[in-house]
Image: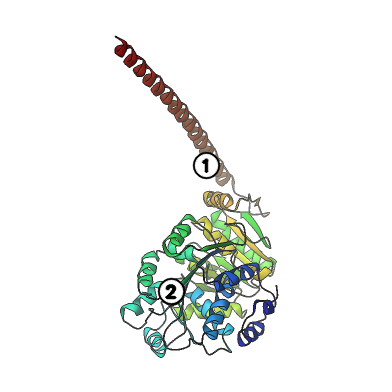
């Protein structure tokens, strides 16, 4: 469907076309009419499918048509990370570039004084992380009483990061009846529970199979010892001449070490994680986008907020603790219908995490072994022992569950016989 077909106001349509939009994605085609109807919405779609435009366009169109610009915030978008907040705000500013609307963003790591001045000047739309917004609320820098549109973007991630209490506090300050929109890449039980708490008879939208990755992302697993992961990564980047690679490490410490070792291998790398200042993180992202560095080493703080045009490669140096985070990491490539490559470096100790991922996305990966990177005899033997122990444990558990089921069934039979005996004896007594 063409962007011309959804009846956007002239200035908004002009901006959307200036951003390069021609056709709507499936999530945009379905979500925009639902949002315009005024109903609350719970929407789920794979990352990179255009969720930001799906909620931004109808909200901006409504604000512009109703001439609501002024000093009170009419639309609030909450995101889990700084990077995602900045990305959403930038997108909304581009969409509204020809509209008389003011878009602002506040998040942790930014200067409180400049954010306070921004809020005092008045905004139509505010994009924020929950923690920093609570700080401004406590300082009475912001008024949310006139909010008419509330968007919870990446709602599952906000729950994982412990923002539920903050969201509840913010909701209490919204005095006007408002429309609430929840967008998420996964659709967990926690998200459903949040929807039941905050949404009123919502419309449900899921444009793709839940907990799935894009079919345009080629996913591979390389089987390698933990000690040789960095060596294999450097070889893959160097031999294949990869120029833009986003690498996910498990911790800030391991990210620091990996970036340093890549530099020693002659591969320019930058860092993005929670210990870095916002300025340092912004510079790392800019250098990565502009090709000044070949590798960006990040922790999961970056998994939801990065939107890098034509990112070709994502590497899981360490698999995520939560299987759902694999979907978000992989979703950094293959965005907006493009193709991409996602590689996971898996050692024997990662096997359980990989099994959880395979169960979630319902796919079994072939373990690729690069020539020269075979496990040594001790590692292979240790892994075989772990596999056999797990299989034995599973057999024991299956046998235990079977015996428990038989015992339960026999117990029911015994109980039933006892009940019938009691009834029979009672009958005999009455006859006597």
Q: Residues within 10 Å of mark 1 (few under 14, many from 20)?
A: some
Where is residue 171, by image quadrant? bottom left
In this view, 80 is above or below 371 = below
Q: Is residue 63 above or below residue 406?
A: below
Q: In the image, which is nearer the foreground, mark 2 or mark 1? A: 2
Image x and y of residue 336, in percent: 65, 70
Using the numbered discs, state the Cα–Cα distance from disc 2 to disc 1 in whole angstroms. Answer: 42 Å
Q: Secondary structure at mark 2?
A: loop
Q: Tell me which corner region of the image, top left, top right, bottom left or bottom right, holds residue 35.
A: bottom right
Q: Residues within 10 Å of mark 2 (few under 14, many from 20)?
A: many
Residue 175 in the figure: left or right of residue 124: left
Left or right of residue 150, residue 220 in this image: right
Res. 265 visible in picture: no
Q: Position of residue 404 (x, y in %)?
A: 44, 30
Q: Which quarter of the rendered picture does the C terminus lie within?
A: top left
Mark 2 or mark 1, which has the lower sequence index?
2
The quarter of the picture where the N terminus appears is bottom right
Residue assigned mark 2: 129
Which residue is under mark 1? Answer: 386
Q: Is residue 225 visible?
A: yes
In percent of width and height, residue 427 lies at 34, 15
- Residue 354 in picture, x, y percent from top left: 56, 52
Q: Secondary structure at mark 1?
A: helix
Residue at 47% of width from left, 58% of height from top?
A: 192
Query: Marks 2 and 1: CB-CB under 8 Å?
Result: no
């Amino acid at each position: 469907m063409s962007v011309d077909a959804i009846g956007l106001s002239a200035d908004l349509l002009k901006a959307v076309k200036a951003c390069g939009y021609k056709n709507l994605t499936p999530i945009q085609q379905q979500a925009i009419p639902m949002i315009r109807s005024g109903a609350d919405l719970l929407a789920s779609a794979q990352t990179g499918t255009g969720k930001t435009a799906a909620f931004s366009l109808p909200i901006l169109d409504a604000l512009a048509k109703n001439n609501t610009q002024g000093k009170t915030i009419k639309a609030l978008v909450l995101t889990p990370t700084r990077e995602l907040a900045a990305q959403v705000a930038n997108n909304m500013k581009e969409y509204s570039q020809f509209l008389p609307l003011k878009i602002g963003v506040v998040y942790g790591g930014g200067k409180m004084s400049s954010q306070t001045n921004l809020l005092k000047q008045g905004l139509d739309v505010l994009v924020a992380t929950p923690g920093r917004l609570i700080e401004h609320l406590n300082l009475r820098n912001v008024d949310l009483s006139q909010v008419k549109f509330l968007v919870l973007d990446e709602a599952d991630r906000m729950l994982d990061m412990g923002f539920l209490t903050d969201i509840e506090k913010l909701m209490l300050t919204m005095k006007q009846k408002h429309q609430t929109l929840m967008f998420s890449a996964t659709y967990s039980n926690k998200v459903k529970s949040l929807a039941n708490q905050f949404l009123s008879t919502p419309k449900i939208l899921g444009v793709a199979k839940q907990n799935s990755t894009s079919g345009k992302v080629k996913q591979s697993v390389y089987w390698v010892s933990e000690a040789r992961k960095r060596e294999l990564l450097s070889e893959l980047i160097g031999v294949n001449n990869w120029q833009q690679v986003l690498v996910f490490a498990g911790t800030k410490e391991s990210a620091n070490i990996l970036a340093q070792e890549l530099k020693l291998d002659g591969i320019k790398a930058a860092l993005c994680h929670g210990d870095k200042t916002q300025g340092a993180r912004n510079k790392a992202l800019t250098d990565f986008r502009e090709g000044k560095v070949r590798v960006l080493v990040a922790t999961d703080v970056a998994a939801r907020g990065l939107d890098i045009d034509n990112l070709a490669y994502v590497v899981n140096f360490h698999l995520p603790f939560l299987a759902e985070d694999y979907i978000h990491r992989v979703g950094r490539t293959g965005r907006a219908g493009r193709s991409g490559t996602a590689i996971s470096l898996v050692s024997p100790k990662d096997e359980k995490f990989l099994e959880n991922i395979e169960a979630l996305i319902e796919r079994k990966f072939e373990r690729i072994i690069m020539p020269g990177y075979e496990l040594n005899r001790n590692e292979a033997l240790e892994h075989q022992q772990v596999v056999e122990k797990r299989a034995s444990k599973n057999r024991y558990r299956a046998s235990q569950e079977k015996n428990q089921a038989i015992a339960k069934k026999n117990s029911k039979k015994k109980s039933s016989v006892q009940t019938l005996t009691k009834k029979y004896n009672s009958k005999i007594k009455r006859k006597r």
